[in-house]
Image: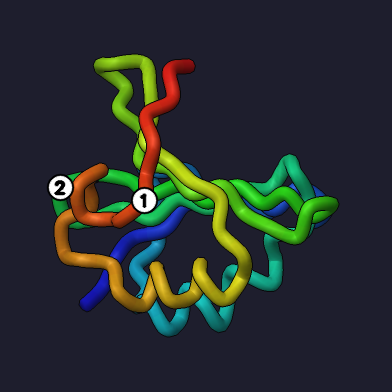
């Protein structure tokens, strides 16, 4: 299964917009992208075929990541904190359609 990714790696200035997202497998996302998320200003977005997103926001000082499924129309997201191992497991198990019901343990959070 393939997803499309967009990201910002602040220290190197690398940026790929959601409109120019790059196709990757879950394995490639884990191997090539996660180690690059080292600053609170970095982010990674994973898009399914319908442009539904899972966003990954690192919190390096706390050794964790915030993962969220944004709902632009509701101006909110469903998310939770995960450690690196949980993040890799979550990415490897992503369903073909990403939504707030497909990922266990997410909580509603208005913006």
Image height of 62 relative to 92, above or below: above
| Disc 1 secondary structure class | loop
Q: Are marks 1 and 2 in contact (CB under 8 Å)?
A: no
Q: Which mark is residue 50?
A: 2
Residue at image mark 1: 105
Residue at point 67%, 51% (across, down): 58
Give residue 74's quadrant in the image: top left
How many residues crowd around disc 1 within 10 Å: few (fewer than 14), some, or many (20 or more)?
Answer: few
Q: Nearer the viewer, residue 107 or 25?
A: 107
Image height check: is 107 above or below 9?
above
Spot occupied by residue 27 in the image (x, y as percentages of width and height): 42, 83
- In front of the other: 93 or 26: 93
According to the image, what is the colour scheme of the structure? rainbow
Q: Quadrant of the N terminus?
A: bottom left
In front of the other: 103 or 91: 103
Residue 37 in view (yes/no): yes
Helix, strand or loop at mark 2: loop
* Residue 16 visible in the displayed image: no
Q: Nearer the viewer, mark 1 or mark 2?
A: 1
How far apart marks 1 and 2 lie (CA) works out to 22 Å
- The residue carrying pointer 2 sits among few (fewer than 14), some (14 to 19) or many (20 or more) residues within 10 Å by Cα, namely few
Q: Earlier in the sequence, mark 1 or mark 2?
A: 2
Residue at 30 percent across and 27 percent down: it is 71
Q: Position of residue 94 (x, y in %)?
A: 28, 67
Image vertical order of residue 73 relative to residue 32, above or below: above
Residue 57 x/y as whole percent: 60, 47
Q: Position of residue 65 (x, y in %)?
A: 62, 54
């Amino acid at each position: 299964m393939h997803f499309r990714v967009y990201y910002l790696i602040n220290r190197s200035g690398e940026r790929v917009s959601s409109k120019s997202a790059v196709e990757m497998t879950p394995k490639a996302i884990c191997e090539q992208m996660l180690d690059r998320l080292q600053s609170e200003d970095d982010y990674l977005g994973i898009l399914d075929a319908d442009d539904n997103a899972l966003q990954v926001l690192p919190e390096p000082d706390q050794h964790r990541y915030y993962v969220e499924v944004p709902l632009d129309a509701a101006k909110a997201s469903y998310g939770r904190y995960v450690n690196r191992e949980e993040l890799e497991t979550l990415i490897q198990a992503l369903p073909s359609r990403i939504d707030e019901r497909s990922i266990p343990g997410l909580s509603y959070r208005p913006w």
